Image: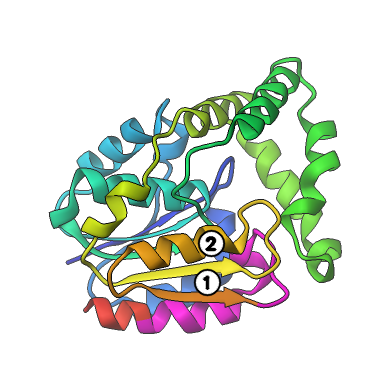
Amino acid sequence: MTPLILLPGMACDAALWQPLQAELVAAHRAGPVVVADVQGRSDSLPAMAALLLAEQPGDLLLAGCSLGGMLAMEAARQAPQRMRGLALLGTSARPDTPELISLRRNAITEFAAGRVEPLLRANALFAFHPSHQAGLVEAYIAMVLRAGAASLIRQNTAVMARADLRPTLAAITCPTLVVGGADDLLTPPDCSREIAAAIPGAQLQLLPECGHMLTWEQPQALADLLLPWLARCG
């Protein structure tokens, strides 16, 4: 039994995967489909991956969005022999730039002061393609508010401190699907192209009219890619 572990993005929860979960459960007959929450219980990317690997023994299929994709790549670095497939969605293997670190530090200051919702409302539109903003922005804000300031601070701190994962990608040998939003302003398509180019045999797809929130913006197009990937993984 090989579980399919769904890894949410920063300050996200199982709602991020809800549009696809029933289809994934129906398609994945080799084991359970589990939404992980280790990103909310650890203080660094390596610690998140170590906790995931400890709690989910044996072979794994990992599908991760954004921070979840970083976590999947880190788990593959720590336990390459256990990976049976990776789906890396709207994510990056690069470390944060000094500019991004400065932005995150400023955000952490706002979160610590209790100004979570104003900052979210000022920036949430950047997570979506304009054609999807009206229906999804409020749901996104509600999901992040459920996570709360402490989780936002912890996860932003972990992302700021992450290592450059690009040198580890060539060692990945399992079937790998890389998907990005063609209009993603937070993790630009070049990040997906870079990951796919570094992993031998990786499949790359950029979804049109799609920003950073792939599972909500283009759930059917994403499912149409994930189901054949699952079949390849066995």
In the image, which residues are magenta?
Answer: 208-228
User: Is residue 167 left or right of 207 when viewed as pictured?
Assistant: left
User: Is residue 120 left or right of 199 when viewed as pictured?
Assistant: right
Q: Tell me what residue is drawn at x 64 percent, y 74 percent.
A: 218
User: Is residue 10 left or right of 201 when viewed as pictured?
Assistant: right
Q: Where is residue 192 in the image (x, y as percent from the top left)?
A: 50, 63
Q: Nearer the viewer, residue 232 or 100?
A: 100
Q: Where is residue 32 in the image (x, y as percent from the top left)?
A: 29, 64
Residue occupied by mark 2: 17
Distance from disc 1 to disc 2, alpha carbons, whole Å, reads 6 Å
User: Is residue 78 left or right of 208 when viewed as pictured?
Assistant: left
Residue occupied by mark 1: 20
Q: Quadrant of the N terminus?
A: bottom left
SS at circle 1 = helix
Q: Residues within 10 Å of mark 2 (few under 14, many from 20)?
A: many
Q: Does the magenta stretch include residue 217?
A: yes
Overall secondary structure of the magenta section:
helix
Identify the amino acid type marked 1: Leu
Q: Is residue 44 magenta?
A: no
Q: How crowded is mark 1: few (under 14 residues within 10 Å), some or many (20 or more)?
A: some
Q: Which of 28 and 44 is in front in this view?
A: 44
Above or below residue 40? Residue 32 is below
SS at circle 2 = helix
Above or below residue 138? Residue 231 is below
Identify the amino acid type marked 2: Trp
Q: Which of 93 and 16 is in front in this view?
A: 93
Q: How many labels does the image show?
A: 2
Above or below residue 58? Residue 227 is below
Q: Tell me what residue is drawn at x 44 percent, y 38 percent.
A: 39
Q: Position of residue 20 (x, y in %)?
A: 52, 71
Q: In which quarter of the image is the C terminus?
A: bottom left
